[in-house]
Image: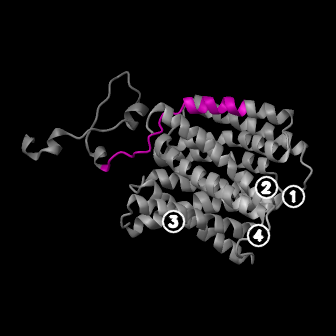
Amino acid sequence: MSTPIGSLLIAIGFVVCWSSGFIGGRLASEAATPVLSLFAWRFVLAALLVGLWWWLKGSRPLARQEMLRELLTGSLTMGGYLLGVILAIEQGVNAGIVALMTALQPILASALAGPWLGERLSGRGWLGMIIASLGMGLCVVGDLATNATSPPLWSYGLPLLSVISVTLGSLLTVRGPSAMSLPATLTIQLTGAALIFTLAAWIGGSLALPQTDTDSLWAIGWLVVLSSLGGYGLFVASLRQLGVTKTSTLVYLTPAVTLVWTAAMFGEYPGLWALVGMAVAGFGVAVAIRSARKSDPTPRAPVAHRAPRTWSTDETWDVARTASFPRSPYYENPAQRP
């Protein structure tokens, strides 16, 4: 789906399915199955389904280094990220607030993507990020004004740990693009997330078989189909298609979609300030995305730095430095060397 329409569909699907994970956490907190155990079984089932897809497409033996890399990536982008989210919701933090706090992830991703990956935002792009952050702040203020629960103060730090986890996983994914197929990548990453939640449930003393009550089955089905297969499948596709900067910027749209989910399913409607914040954040996202200088995650070959390059007088040093360095024809064919 390398066409503009395909990229747009990936972006829309990613935002919708990614935001469904916060609603899934709310549904899981109301089920009879302990929430950490439910998430562990959710990832086990999702890994089995994607693994079946991988097997039907024709699986191939994988190198040990490839598997360990994807296990670590899944542990960060799925396991570590959602563990902080779920624990915060379980402590009483509103799902919309959690989504708003995790929307800080693009700021950290953009700050690290420059020195790590060469994906830079222009000054206008950073302005868009700031505008979007202000919009998120307005949403937080509006939601706190109508929030009747009083979760402990430390629980608001859990989504920030999720931000760090998913950012590191995203950068790891793009820093060294995998040659593995999408089914293989998802299978191993989902397995890594299952291990994280199984360990967390075991440490917390809540590891148990899933219950067959309606709430548990509904939550598992929601999380497997929308959040796991849809959300993380489109997450990987978006990283490969759009790059880490644009994918991370799209996260700014998930709080608004999450608030729409909560209003439709639980009757929790955002206030005036939250609505204003959504509009401001949406405008900032549009500015940041349009200003991204580079979203191609493919790194330059190491030999590119060996060949000298000159640039014209009207070309800035920054443009010349980030441009590709073509090989010398004498390097390609030693017989042509003088």
- What's the CA distance linking mark 3 and mark 2? 27 Å
Mark found first going from the N terminus, 2 or 1 = 1
Q: Residue at x 31, y 45 (%)?
A: 305
According to the image, label 4 marks what residue?
A: 34
The quarter in which the N terminus is drawn is top left
Q: Is residue 157 visible?
A: no
Direction from residue 164 to residue 329 in the image, left or right: left
Question: Which residues are drawn in magenta?
Answer: 280-302
Q: Residues within 10 Å of mark 3 (few under 14, many from 20)?
A: many
How far across and how far down the image is residue 237, in percent?
50, 47
Direction from residue 29 to residue 1 in the image, left or right: left
Q: Nearer the viewer, residue 151 or 26?
A: 26
According to the image, label 2 marks what residue?
A: 156
Badge 1 element: loop
Badge 3 element: helix
The quarter in which the C terminus is drawn is top left
Instruction: Return the mark for residue 151.
Output: 1
The reply to whether callout 4 and callout 3 are in contact (CB within 8 Å) is no
Q: Residues within 10 Å of mark 1 (few under 14, many from 20)?
A: some
Badge 4 element: loop
The reply to whether callout 2 and callout 4 are in contact (CB within 8 Å) is no
Q: Amino acid at mark 2?
A: Tyr
